[in-house]
Image (cartoon, grey):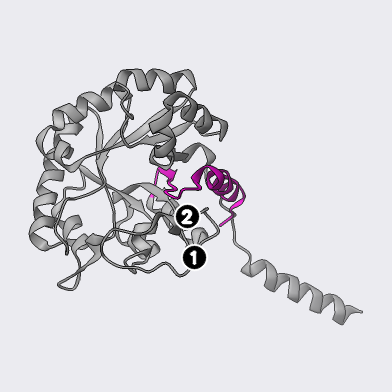
Amino acid sequence: MKLKIALASLVLGCVASTWPSSIETVPRKAVGLQLYSMRDRFKKDVAQTLDQVRAFGITNVELAGTYGVAPEKFKEQLDARQIKAISGHFSYEQCRDDIEGVAREAKLLGLEYAGCAWIPHKDPFDEKTCREAAAVFNRAGEALAKHGIKFFYHTHGYEFLPYRDGTLFDLLMAETNPEYVRIEMDVYWIIHPGQDPVKLLEKYGKRFELMHVKDMKRGTPGGFTGQSDVTNNVAVGQGIIDWPNVFRAAKKAGVKWYFIEDESPTSVAQIPQSLRYLETLRF
């Protein structure tokens, strides 16, 4: 009997030693939605689409334009539904040629972050374009900082072409000022060119303040074009991405906001599934 008790204690001790010392969850208040996910509906009816966003339980969003509505009027519609716009995407040309205009619009919308999600380029993306973009981002970030707004660049896959002993993304990180240029990691566009989001979060740490949470269907072809069929977007947790490890690394790096982005034609059905997955995720 004593031997059985001793063996049981040993087994329980081994199990306890391998169980995580703490279980983390995705902070609900840090989860939002990139409204581009609802772009087709916004084109038909802005008010009804915002009602749908609120019905999801979403209170924080990231913008990609205001769908023909003046920024101050769009903010009024957000406020009426108790939705807060945390960040917004602006074109490269706006960031390069009219950063003060970006600042004015960001202020009208009450944004904390304003950023760029695409660098115009001829394929393949190259060193010259990368260095030019870095200079644009440094100037934009410094200008926005004077208005109390944080600038960011959103990864899109083509930046990971090989360059010297690393990638062009490494060059972009080296050439941009961490004080003025933050990075929004779109996990889909990290996986697509064959990169490891966990290693990047470990390498660049606090440069990543924002994240797009977007999952990838198994069998999706990769590449360096920044292009992928939107039907390859699946509900978070139903694709190939190892979310527990990604969120563990993101928390350690200090990511502040997690925006679900679902570009698929079935996004309205998939967004609630993604939210449920994040609510139950433990890592």
The x and y percentages for residue 11 are 74, 75
Q: Residue at (34%, 69%) from the top-left corner?
A: 194
Q: Is 214 situated left or right of 99 in this image?
A: right
Within-10-Å neighbours for mark 2: few <14, some 14–19, many 20+: many
Q: Secondary structure under badge 1? A: loop
Residue 100 occupies which quadrant of the picture?
Answer: top left
Q: Secondary structure under badge 2? A: helix
Using the image, tell me which numbered label, if any, was put on residue 240: 1
The x and y percentages for residue 6 are 81, 77
Q: In this picture, which residue range is highlighted in magenta?
A: 254-283
The x and y percentages for residue 67 are 33, 30
260 part of magenta stretch: yes
Q: Amino acid at mark 1?
A: Ile
The x and y percentages for residue 173 are 20, 56
Q: CA distance from mark 2 to mark 1?
A: 15 Å
Read off the residue under disc 2: 247
Closer-to-camera residue (62/165): 62
